[in-house]
Image (cartoon, helix red, strand yellow):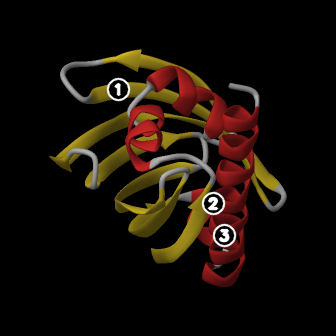
């Protein structure tokens, strides 16, 4: 089952500072909903552990996230692959950072994923809603981390 998600979010941080945060695994583990581990697995590659609840189905994922096509401090592409008790997921997400002024940036994102296994049985409408919720939670967590800097 294929999923797509696009959007943008204004972040109260200069583009260079936002770039640094989005490339820091210690920040990512705190910002990504359900993420409980991030370990280096090579240059711009990390092993991640996630625990997620999708509707009435919950479980854990182990996978890798790699950063590709870096154009510092403007954009990069994340490649994500994982599997676990809920099934599997493979996807990519492109992030574009646009400076709006000295203290703010616009973060545009566009991603697609292929999911299978038990989680795919939940249905596309439910998974689309969950994906949007997880994106909103990521930005809420990121905003909190920025405010506490």
Q: In the picture shown, does residue 47 fall above or below 123?
A: above
The disc label shown at residue 46, or none: 1
* Distance from Cα at disc 2 to Cα at disc 3: 5 Å
Residue 124 rendering spot, x and y as whole percentages:
61, 80
* Distance from Cα at disc 2 to Cα at disc 1: 20 Å
Residue 122 appears in view: yes
Residue 135 rendering spot, x and y as whole percentages:
63, 60
Camera-side residue of 7 and 41:
7
Q: Residues within 10 Å of mark 1 (few under 14, many from 20)?
A: some
Residue 103 rendering spot, x and y as whole percentages:
55, 50
Residue of label 2? 135
* Distance from Cα at disc 3 to Cα at disc 1: 23 Å
The answer to which image quadrant residue 31 occupies is: top right
Camera-side residue of 18 and 34:
18
Camera-side residue of 15 and 116:
15
Do the residues bearing badges 2 and 1 touch, measured as CB atoms within 8 Å?
no
Q: Earlier in the sequence, mark 3 or mark 1?
A: 1
In percent of the image, x 47 and y 28: which residue is there? 48
Residue of label 3? 132
Residue 1 appears in view: no
Q: Secondary structure at mark 1?
A: strand
Q: Residues within 10 Å of mark 2 (few under 14, many from 20)?
A: some
């Amino acid at each position: 089952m294929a999923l797509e998600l696009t959007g943008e979010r204004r972040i109260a941080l200069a583009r260079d500072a936002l770039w640094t945060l989005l490339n820091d695994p210690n920040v990512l583990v705190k910002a990504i909903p359900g993420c409980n581990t991030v370990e280096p697995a090579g240059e711009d590659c990390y092993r991640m552990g996630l625990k997620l609840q999708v509707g009435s189905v919950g479980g854990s994922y182990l996978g890798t996230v790699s950063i590709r096509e870096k154009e510092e401090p403007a954009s990069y592409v994340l490649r994500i692959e994982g599997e676990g008790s809920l099934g599997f997921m493979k996807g990519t997400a492109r992030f574009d950072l646009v400076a709006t002024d000295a203290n703010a940036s616009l973060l545009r994102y566009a991603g697609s994923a292929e999911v299978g296994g038990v989680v795919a049985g939940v249905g596309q409408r439910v998974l689309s809603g969950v994906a949007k919720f997880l994106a909103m939670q990521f930005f809420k967590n990121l905003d909190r981390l920025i405010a506490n800097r």
